[in-house]
Amino acid sequence: MSNTLPPLRRTSENRAQWAKVLIYCAARWGKTNLARTVPGGPSKALILATEIGDTGGLQTLGDVPCGMIKITDLTEMGLVLSELERRQVPPSRATLDGPAGVYYGGEHFTTVINDSYTATVDGPIYDAALSNQGWNSVWEKADRKDPRQFYPYLNEKGRQVAKSLMALEAHVVFLCREGLVEEGEGRERRVWHAPELPGQKLPRELPGWPDATLHGVWVNGQRALWTREHYKSVSGFRVPPNFAVPDKIVPNLDLIFRLTLGDSTVCREIAFTPNRQEAPQTQLPSLETTFRR
């Protein structure tokens, strides 16, 4: 613990070096393909793959040279994060120790993507929580297990992994599957989209941590990212209010990072414009309409 007072700073002098972004969307929306759009090209993306299967669900990127680390348990995740932290280079030392970013296996990366954070919590962290309790599963009624003993550990480990990722000297992207959160009963019941994560706390807490939280949607058969809170579904950039951020933007990480780091000139380039030649999809009723009936 430090015994000295931290210095006084001015918010106008804050300059972020790296973007920390969370993107959540429905399955098969194409979140893995976002790795193609990182600054410097796909070879500068390091994917921490936690989806089930030997390929980590990354067959979509079989034609590009993204870096990939397959992670199967929480111990491996801890070792990988420790190695990235040990070998990272901040921008202030870039000229002395090589290019800024993180290093793994002797290779340099500027973007770390957890694909997916949902699978990280629902896989390695969930399994570690079971092991911590000495259980094989949570919901065996015959054993009269109390899930309240299980989820605090899971939430805490989920927070620790997220904080370690956000502290890396690199752009960091959390990719999550889309889920639903609900509260209230009867006519007061409300349901909204959120990152699909176990328990009640992480789906509500995590979207508020990164510099940008974006919700993947379909518009006229095209992918877009929503940048405004809607029906309590959290979306938005942490930028000054004079930035004319469009309601919907194109799914391009290079542009998203630039906007997150304070480049307001990107606002026009990043705006989503539907392809008028495509037939619009059938408009489904909104969540609020559906669940208030």
Image: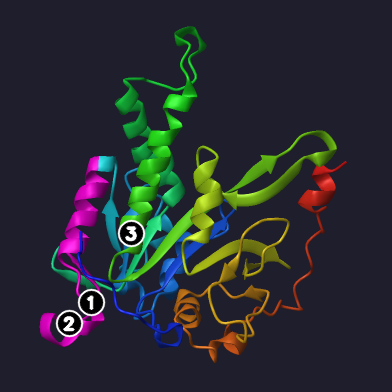
Quarter of the image with the C terminus is top right
Q: Regarding mark 1 in the picture, which secondary structure is present there?
A: loop
Mark 2 secondary-structure assignment: helix
Q: Looking at the rendered structure, which numbered label has been put on residue 165?
A: 3
Q: Residues within 10 Å of mark 3 (few under 14, many from 20)?
A: many
Quarter occupied by residue 53: top left
Dominant secondary structure of the residues highlighted in magenta in the image: helix
Q: Which residue is mark 2?
A: 93
Q: Which label's residue is closer to the chain start, 1 or 3?
A: 1
Q: CB of mark 2 within 8 Å of CB of mark 1?
A: yes
Q: Residue at x 52, y 43 (%)?
A: 201
**Amino acid type of the residue that numbered disc 3 sits on in the rendered structure:** Leu
Q: Residue furthest bottom?
A: 265
Task: Report crowding for label 2: few under 14, some 14 to 19, many 20 or more residues within 10 A (C-alpha).
Answer: few
Image marks 3 and 2: residues in contact by CB distance under 8 Å = no
Q: Which residue is mark 1?
A: 90
Magenta-colored span: 75-104
Q: Judge from the rendering whether residue 18 lies leftward or rightward of residue 224; answer left or right.
A: left
Whole-angstrom CA distance, mark 2 to mark 1, is 6 Å
Q: Which numbered disc, 3 or 2, marks the residue that appears first in the sequence?
A: 2
- Residue at 46% over, 66% down: 21
User: Relative to residue 75, is residue 26 drawn left or right?
Assistant: right
99 in the magenta segment: yes
Residue extending farthest to the right is 293
Between 19 and 222, the one lying in front of the other is 19
Does 146 sit above or below residue 45? above
Name the residue type under label 1: Pro
Q: Is residue 254 visible?
A: yes
For residue 42, above or below residue 83: below
Q: Cα distance, mark 1 to mark 3? A: 15 Å
